[in-house]
Image: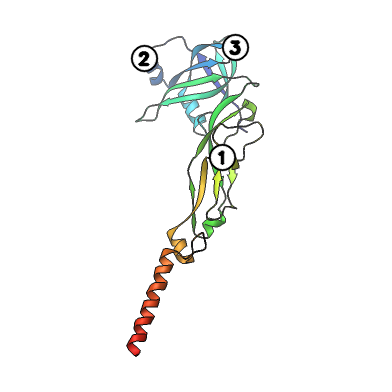
Amino acid sequence: MAKNVTLPAEKREVQGTSASKRLRREGIVPGVIYGSSQREYMIQLNSKSFFDLARKQASHNFLVNLEIEGAEEKSKLAIVQDIQRDPLSGSLIHIDFRAVSETETINATVPIELVGEPVGVKSGGLLEQTIHEIEIFCRPGDLPDAIVNDVEGLEIGDTLKVSDLNLLDGVTTKMGADVLVAVLAQTRAAASEGGVGEDGEPTAESAEGEGAEGDTAKEEGGDKS
């Protein structure tokens, strides 16, 4: 489960583009908090502190306990909803927090982590992951850092679908059950070395090789006569 961390912040009184630019020059990133039946208001926090915290998270949607100086409710449980960064420098521009309660259902996008080396890879196959993250729904206390699946048992031709994911108790998704997450594909090299395809029939390369050998044998036999 994701761990809540405490993050100090301050209620922000200044607004506007000029004021926000000045804050960022001083190492402060502007933000906003909304949701959970409360009015929206502006906050600000130390840019480096948030940056150091965010880069340790598996997902950009993570829970924090905001300690907001100057606010009526100094302590707020919130999820990081959106992080705006400068497209060139990567520096923080603005952060959206959504206040939540322990009893409400929240949504978050978390990564899908596939662990272990499939037996099919050891046989020359290739594991191709088609989606790397998924939107989930759960209560704050059930929010995982990631959806982790062991794929050691996958053989060539096997697939992993959304319905196969290890969703913990209390965690659901609206993504279709048949959506493909990963496939263990057969490489050309593996097919060539094996000589047969997944259906048990000779591969094109194998068949061509056998045909060439047969032609050579016929030619040699004709020469002898």
Under circle 2, the secondary element is helix
Depth check, mark 1 against mark 3: the one in front is 1
Which residue has dot 1 on it? 162
| Residue projecting furthest to the left | 223
Which residue has dot 3 on it? 73
Camera-nearest residue between 99 and 48: 99
Which residue has dot 2 on it? 17
- Mark 2 neighbour density, 10 Å: few (under 14) some (14–19) many (20 or more): few
38 w.r.t. 216: above or below: above
Q: Residue at x 63, y 26 (%)?
A: 139
Q: Is residue 102 left or right of residue 21?
A: right
Name the image quarter holding residue 224.
Answer: bottom left
Q: Amino acid at mark 3?
A: Glu
Under circle 3, the secondary element is loop
Q: Is residue 171 left or right of residue 44?
A: right
Closer to the N terminus: mark 3 or mark 2? 2
Q: Is residue 146 left or right of residue 224?
A: right
- Mark 3 neighbour density, 10 Å: few (under 14) some (14–19) many (20 or more): few
Quadrant of the rendering where the N terminus is positioned: top right
